[in-house]
Every structure is written in C-alpha cells, then in structure tokens.
Amino acid sequence: MFLAIDIGNTSINIGLFDGSKLRNSWRIATNRHKMADEYAVLLLSLLVSEEIDIKDIKASALCAGVPKVRAAFVQMLQRYFKIEPLVVGAGIKTGVKILMDNPKEVGADRIVNSAAVRIKYNQAAIVVDLGTATTFDIINAAGEYIGGVISPGIELAAEGLSERAAALPSVELAAPAKVIGKNTVDAMKSGIVYGYAELVEGMIKRIKQESGEGKTVVVATGGYAELVAPFVDSIDFVEPSLTLEGLRAIYFMNRA
C-alpha cells in the first residue's frame, strides 16, 4: 500500500492507495506545534479504525507548504513506518516544465496538481484549488506550467468579514437558498459562496482569453471545491483527491 500526504496551511489530506485505487482518505487539522509522535498517534489510530496493518504500507510521498510539519511527518514515517518518503521539491521529476520567472516560488502542491491533471487529461488545463488560498494553475497543451493566480481563500474571507466588522457574526460556510438574503446571516452566506463562485467563473474566463489555448479542461480541487463548484458553470470536473493521485504518480515516476 501507498500513503500520500498533502500538508496544507489549514488541513492535512492523507490518502491510502491499494494499487492504483484510493482505499481511504482522511483530512486532519494542521498543527505546527504537534510533534512527530503526536501525529503518529493520530494517524495510527485512523489506520487501526480501518483494520489496516502499517506493515502493509510500503511507500509514501508528501508535499508540504509548512516546513515544520513536513519535518514532523518525515520523522514519523521513518520512525513508525520504516519508510523514507519522497518529498516533492527541487530536483524531483514531475513531468511538468515550470515556465515561471522563478520556478522555486511555485508551491509543491500546485506542481503536484498540475502533474496529476497532465497525466489524467493530457490537454490544456486550469486547476482551481479552493483551500486556504484560492489558486488557479494553468497548464498549456504541451504540458507546461505557464503561470497562476492566487486569491484569498473562502474561509479567510469569511473570517476577515466577521473579525473586522464588529456587527457581523461568524457564519457557516454554506450556500443560502437565494442570492438576496432576508437576514444578515443569509446575506453573508450569499456574498461569500456566490461571490466566490463569481470570482472563480470570472477568473476562468479571463485566463482562457489570455492563454489562447483553445480547448481547456477546468478541474476543481481543495477543501471547498464541492461547496463552490456547483455554482460555477465553467468547472468541468471536481477532483477532491487530485493532489493525492498526483503524489502517487510522481512517486512512481521517480522510482522507475
């Protein structure tokens, strides 16, 4: 079995593959203060609950935007799983050429998503990742990463609205029945969810116009993809496990 780990600023997405099939996945909160042993206790308990023997896990790959948490997971995998994980970063083969002013600036998770889309769809693509940040990654028909867009994430926007405006409450991130709210909570939900849907729709339109790539597949991923995507006509597919699949593909690309 293969363990894929995507460490984000807000959450950690963990996937267990049996062959090419994603058998289980879990999402846990990112905590920069947890030690390797503490993450081990949490992960081992999840595996035990699914009756999975850790001896059956033979390999792992991870990408991380939080260096301290990345180090904790590497240490955990070495100590408890006896695995030396592949850490996606400089020098790792991904199958995607990065056409940026400074390729090292591109987050590992964004490269992994681009690789996954390249392998899965083999055409020009836009990856919309709705997580802590809302990012857009653009891959041309030749499989090259030509650039991206970064916006504040939907949760950050919601928190900022309630924190900076004293009269506004914290609200659940859910779409109200109507755009026009009849109360403050529904009005905030509408502005946040439908507002972000329009942001995504508008950016996709602008990216397509500027890239001139013609036929382009649009794939949404990230923790809030399933919340926003139903209201964005330009999104072709929602792939919650895109990063996990990309990590598995990159691992075997580098071990071949």
Image (cartoon, rainbow, N blue to C red):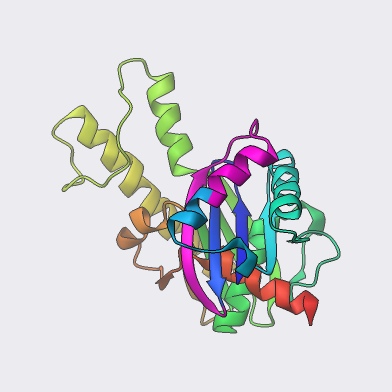
* Residue found at the far top of this picture: 166
User: Quarter holding the C terminus?
Assistant: bottom right
| Residue 72 inside the magenta-drawn segment | no
Q: Position of residue 68 (x, y in %)?
A: 73, 39
149 versus 154 height, above or below? below
| Residue 43 inside the magenta-drawn segment | yes
Q: Is residue 100 visible?
A: yes
Q: Is residue 212 toward the left or the right of residue 228 in the image?
A: right
Residue drawn at (40%, 34%) of the image = 158
Quadrant for residue 110, please give it: bottom right
Q: Position of residue 138 (x, y in %)?
A: 61, 67
Number of marks in picture: 0
Residue drawn at (75%, 47%) of the image = 75
The stretch of residues the image draws in magenta is 19-44
Q: Position of residue 19 (x, y in %)?
A: 57, 80
* Residue found at the far right of this picture: 91
